[in-house]
Each structure stands twice: as C-alpha cells, then as structure tokens.
Amino acid sequence: MEIVELEARKTLAVRYRTSMAKLAEGMGQVYGEVAAYMAKSGIPFAGPPFAIYYNMDMEDLDVEIGFPVNSPAPGEGRVKPGRLPGGKLAMATHIGSYESLGGTYEKLTAFVQERALTPEEYMYEEYLNSPEDTAPEKLATNIYFPLKAR
C-alpha cells in the first residue's frame, strides 16, 4: 500500500452497466471491441487494460473498460475517448485470483482511513497480466483509489 502521484492518462473505453455475475464475460468482449478499433485506427496501447468502477452496486455496476493511449483519438460507436485520473492516489498491488481481490480492497480501504484521506466515489484497476495465459494465483492487479484534494 502506498500513495502515488500520477499524471492523468488519455484512454479509449466503453462505459456500460452490468451485474457482477456478467462482468467477466462482458469485459472480454469490450476489451476486444476497443482493441479492434485501436488496431483498425493504428492507435498503439500506452499501458495495461483497466476498469473504472463508478459504483459498487453488484447488480448494476457502472463500469468503464478500456486501454490508455498516448494521443487523443475520436473513438467510434461505443468506444469513446476518456481519461484515467491523475493526482494523488492510494494504490495496492494484488497478486492472486480476481475472486480474492476483496481482501486487498479491504486493506487499501483501511490504509486510506488510517491516514484520514478521502477517496473519490470511484476506483480503478489495471490488469498487469492476462487470465488467458497466467495462472490465477499469479495474476497481478493494481488497485487505485483517487484521493480528494484537501
């Protein structure tokens, strides 16, 4: 757990609503949709895939899924330009299956509370490797809580 300072990053992503039960299958499709647009448009990836969670309603998640890019791009259809927030963020790296992320979220929440920091209403994850070619116990996920300025 640590506090990091990051620059805002441009993105291409799809924002949609889904249930937690359908999130995994939807994510793969959305990443494919965004990656196909980027390939067709000659836009290189500028970092690992991410998911921003704007709420924690497990039956109606408001989620934005995509990739960082170096240059602004117009998007197409559901694929829209956006940004990952910059500034001060509380950050933790989780090693293990996605099903066990909850424990790291709890630790990061406690870390923020112990320091009397106030997180924004949303958080995001970066996926540093893929479940397609990585064993579940070796998956690496960065979790970020953007922090409100004091």
Image: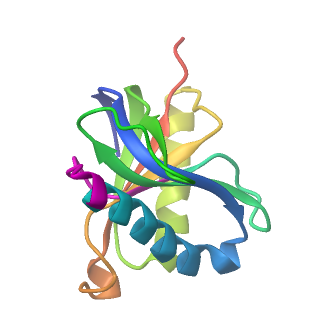
> Where 43 sits versus 71, above or below?
below
Q: Position of residue 76 (x, y in %)?
A: 48, 49
Q: Residue at x 28, y 52 (%)?
A: 41
Part of the protein shown in magenta:
40-51
Dominant SS type (magenta): loop
Count of labels shown?
0
The structure residue drawn at horizontal position 55% and vertical position 66%, both measured from the top left corner, is 102
Q: Is residue 53 left or right of residue 85?
A: right
Residue 128 is a magenta residue: no
The image shows residue 64, relative to residue 32, as above or below, that is above
Give coordinates of residue 136: x percent, y percent: 35, 85
Looking at the image, which residue is at 60% across and 41% down?
Answer: 122
- Is 41 included in the stretch rendered in magenta? yes
Drawn side of residue 114 relative to residue 46, left or right: right
Q: Residue at horizontal 57%, vertical 36%?
A: 113
Of 141 and 74, nearer the camera is: 74
Percent coordinates x, y for residue 24 in the rendering: 54, 77
Q: Which image quadrant for residue 35? A: bottom left
Q: Quadrant of residue 61?
A: bottom right
Quadrant location, the C terminus? top right
130 or 146: nearer the viewer: 130
Residue 144 vs 116, above or below: the answer is below
Which is nearer the eye, 15 or 116? Answer: 15
Give the percent coordinates (x, y) of residue 33. 44, 66
